[in-house]
Image: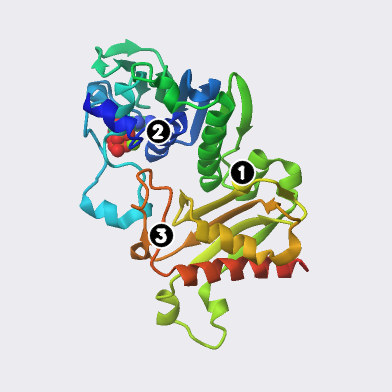
């Protein structure tokens, strides 16, 4: 089957974390103020994402799980707008339904009753009435159950959960106004308050010790151009803003997993950004130690290429040296402000 082959190529659904990513994006697109993610066995046995967003009317449930079904304005320009929008391809639910047992249960806030639909290995069932709170709950059981060599796709439970945790954490930190929670095998991993305060989200995700060691980063190009360049020069600058938090060099870990970078609000992996951050610490980090960092970089939309990687996490910059410089300077100045 075509879809299964595309998935085998890792194009759309690579692992539980990629499913979680699509579902959380849908919840955010739906304007949710709460997004609760819970997974079983790293997501290999079950994934549930519940939100309090706009919901899906019963008569649109079937369309929502169909191929190329999207209610979102998506045209070719979205591809160029790049990191601004979340999903727009109308493929996520369809693809997940092809390789799992998928249930979508929903009630728009103004609807009296909810409804649900189930897809099993691509077989779409009937829409049935269902009692449920306002919003949408998506359940994905037995991911890849009908895929040849299921084991080939799935690593150890702990590894899959690490990836899920990274995804949910990245959305929680980028959306402090949304209460995001994660549960693994019935135990809460973290829950943010959704009170709009970025530091409070960092506290919820990384704990008090890390949160208290975090130093504010705030950089804009006018500071860099203290020689008087302003106006147009600033508007055209390859980096418009760098903000976020970085940890004291003594609050470091043996993994790079806690270096989170966002470009124009979107979580990305860009080695240039990580390296620039580490460079800013100079010799202050112990060998093989990495800081915590959550950095938001704003660049002109046309200057970033998001299509390097099929899952659009890896990005490339037209003006990479300038971006690298800006991030390094931003972090350096923040550390200097704290006598570091
Ligand atoms: P896309 O997000 O690209 O539109 P998806 O397959 O992810 O495609 O979702 C299909 C459609 O189902 C969406 O366009 C939206 O109308 C609806 N939908 C999916 N998840 C939700 C949700 N959590 N809340 C409200 N509507 C949703
Ligand atoms: Mg989507």
For ligand 2, tell me if the residue under mark 2 lies within 8 Å: no
Q: Residue at x 28, y 57 (%)?
A: 80
Q: Are marks 3 and 2 in contact (CB under 8 Å)?
A: no
Few, some or many residues within 10 Å of mark 1 (<14, 14–19, 20+): many
Q: Quadrant of ligand 1?
A: top left
The residue that label 3 is drawn on is 316
Few, some or many residues within 10 Å of mark 2 (<14, 14–19, 20+): some
Left or right: residue 307 versus residue 277 is left
Q: Residue at x 44, y 75 (%)?
A: 237
Mark 3–mark 2 distance (CA, rounded to whole Å): 22 Å
| Residue 129 rendering spot, x and y as whole percentages | 31, 11
Mark 1–mark 2 distance (CA, rounded to whole Å): 28 Å
In the image, is residue 269 above or below residue 297? above
The residue that label 2 is drawn on is 14
Viewport quadrant of the C terminus: bottom right
Left or right: residue 316 versus residue 191 is left
In the image, is residue 206 above or below residue 285? above
In the image, is residue 32 above or below residue 43? below
Left or right: residue 185 versus residue 30 is right
Label 1: which secondary element: helix
| Residue 95 rendering spot, x and y as whole percentages | 30, 28
Q: Residue at x 38, y 61 (%)?
A: 304
Label 3: which secondary element: strand
| Residue 41 rendering spot, x and y as whole percentages | 54, 20
Of the image marks 3 and 2, the number of the one nearer the N terminus: 2
The residue that label 1 is drawn on is 201
Q: Nearer the viewer, residue 308 or 35?
A: 308
For ligand 1, tell me if the residue under mark 1 lies within 8 Å: no
Label 2: which secondary element: loop
**Which image quadrant is residue 120 in?**
top left
| Residue 75 rendering spot, x and y as whole percentages | 21, 49
Of the image marks 1 and 3, the number of the one nearer the N terminus: 1
């Amino acid at each position: 089957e075509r879809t299964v082959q595309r998935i085998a190529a890792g194009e759309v659904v690579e692992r539980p974390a990629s499913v979680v990513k699509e579902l959380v994006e849908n919840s955010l697109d739906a304007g949710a103020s709460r997004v609760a993610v819970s997974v079983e066995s790293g997501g290999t046995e079950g994934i549930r994402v519940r939100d309090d967003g706009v919901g899906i009317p019963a008569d649109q449930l079937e369309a929502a799980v169909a191929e190329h079904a999207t209610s979102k304005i998506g045209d070719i320009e979205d591809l160029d707008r790049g990191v601004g929008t979340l999903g727009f391809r109308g493929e996520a639910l369809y693809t997940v339904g092809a390789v799992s047992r998928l249930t979508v249960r929903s009630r728009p806030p103004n609807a009296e009753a909810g409804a649900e639909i189930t897809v099993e290995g691509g077989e779409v069932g009937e829409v049935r009435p269902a009692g449920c709170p306002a919003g949408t709950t998506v359940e994905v059981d037995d991911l890849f159950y009908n895929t040849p060599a299921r084991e080939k796709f799935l690593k150890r439970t702990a590894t899959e959960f690490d990836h899920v945790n990274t995804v949910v954490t990245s959305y929680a930190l980028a959306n402090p106004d949304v209460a995001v929670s994660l549960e693994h095998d019935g135990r809460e991993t973290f829950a943010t308050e959704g009170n709009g305060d970025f530091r409070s989200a960092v506290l919820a995700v990384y704990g008090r010790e890390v949160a208290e060691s975090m130093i504010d980063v705030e950089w804009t190009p006018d500071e860099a151009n203290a020689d008087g360049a302003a106006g147009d020069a600033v508007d055209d600058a390859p980096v418009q803003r760098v903000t976020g938090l970085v940890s004291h060099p003594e609050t470091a870990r043996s993994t790079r997993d806690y270096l989170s970078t966002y470009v124009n609000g979107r979580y990305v992996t860009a080695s240039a950004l990580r390296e620039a951050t580490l460079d800013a610490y100079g010799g202050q980090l112990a060998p093989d130690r990495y800081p915590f960092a959550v950095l938001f970089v704003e660049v002109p939309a046309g200057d970033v290429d998001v299509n390097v990687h099929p899952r659009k996490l890896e990005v490339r910059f037209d003006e990479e040296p300038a971006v690298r410089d800006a991030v390094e300077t931003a972090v350096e100045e923040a550390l200097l402000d704290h006598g570091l």
